[in-house]
Image: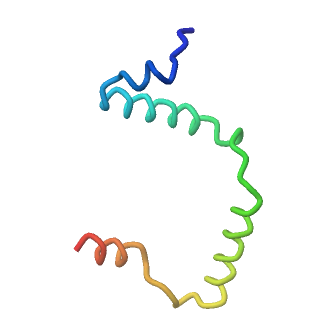
């Protein structure tokens, strides 16, 4: 396995660095169970799910939000 230093990465063209980041991310995404979800993330998701159940008509569907943001 070839070792790449931070200075090696800094010398790469931007396109190569972006590809490297994508490749690293893809390798992490292949093993989702190995990435621990922080407790505070789970708490925030539970809070948001409760808020949705308490007021299911509040907010907007993603399609509407996307349309308003992108114009």
- Please tell me whether residue 29 is drawn above or below residue 19 in the rendered image: below
Quarter-of-image position of residue 69: bottom left
Q: How many marks?
A: 0
The image position of residue 19, as x and y in percent, is 38, 30
Q: Residue 12: give x, y in percent of width and height.
A: 35, 23
The residue lying at 29 percent from left, 74 percent from top is 67
Q: Is residue 6 left or right of residue 64?
A: right
Foreground of the two, 44 or 64: 44
Identify which residue is drawn at 57% across, 39% down: 29
Residue 47 drawn above or below residue 29: below
> Which residue lies most toward the top here?
1
Expressed as whole percent of the image width and height from the top left, the position of residue 30 reads 58, 35
Along the line of sight, the residue nearer the viewer: 32 or 17: 17
Along the line of sight, which residue is nearer the eye, 6 or 68? 6
- Residue at (64, 76) in percent of width and height: 48
Query: How has the structure been colored for display?
Result: rainbow
Q: In the visual, does 14 lie left or right of 59?
A: left
Q: Quadrant of the C terminus?
A: bottom left
> Residue sitting at 34 percent across and 26 percent down?
16
């Amino acid at each position: 396995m070839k070792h790449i230093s931070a200075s090696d990465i800094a010398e790469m063209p931007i396109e190569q660095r972006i590809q490297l980041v994508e490749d690293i991310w893809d390798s992490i995404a292949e093993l989702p169970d190995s990435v621990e979800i922080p407790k505070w993330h789970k708490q925030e998701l539970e809070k948001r799910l409760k808020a949705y159940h308490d007021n299911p008509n509040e907010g907007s569907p993603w399609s509407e939000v996307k349309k308003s943001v992108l114009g």
